[in-house]
Amino acid sequence: LPLDWTRMNECDADASAKDNMPIYHPWDVTAIDPTETYLAVVGTHGQKITRMGSDLSKRVSPQLTELILRSHLIRTMEGIAGMEHLEHLELYDNMVDELRELDGGGGKGKGEGG
């Protein structure tokens, strides 16, 4: 990948860099089957996801149990509200600095009671 596309060479050194990043959602980089209960998109090859998308839960199966978005450029965890069956969420090797939708219907994470 060219460094100017990912802007990894700028990272947090320039606050405006994150605002100028191109926006790529999971559905922009891979085909999403709305009947699958497992979705994994590893960003080691090809385009990197920069936003999960606030409407991600509407684009995946209502029965989704595992969501893996590893090695991307995601800064905000979003779009999981309404994923009632989600058991495993992996955002390893991203740039997450904001967690949204942890309460109010985002599903039960591993290790949580209830």
Image (cartoon, helix red, strand yellow):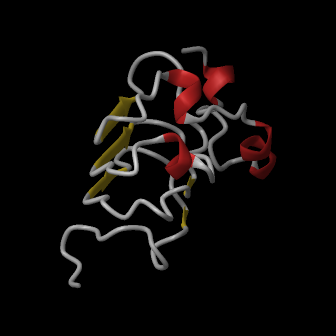
Report the front residue among 112 and 70. 112
Q: Residue furthest bottom?
A: 114
Towards the viewer: 72 or 37: 37
Taking 23 as reference, is 34 left or right?
left
Q: Residue 111, position in %: x, y?
A: 18, 74
Q: Is residue 27 above or below residue 1?
A: below
Quadrant of the rendered image containing residue 71 = top left
103 versus 107 height, above or below: below
Residue 26 in the image: above or below residue 3: below
Where, quadrant-wise, is the C terminus in this rendering?
bottom left
* Numbered label tally: 0
At a point 60% along the width and 14% down the height, the residue shown is 2
Residue 93 appears at what percent x and percent y?
38, 44
Task: Residue at 40%, 51% (x, y): give it.
Answer: 62
User: Where does residue 72 sit, x and y in percent of width and height?
Assistant: 47, 36
The quadrant where residue 39 appears = top left
In the shown orientation, is residue 39 left or right of residue 52? left
Q: Where is the N terminus found, in terms of image quarters?
A: top right
Residue at (55, 62) in percent of width and height? 97
Identify the residue at horizontal 28%, vertical 42% (top origin).
37
Relative placement, left or right, of 52 versus 111 is: right
Q: Is residue 91 above or below residue 29?
A: below
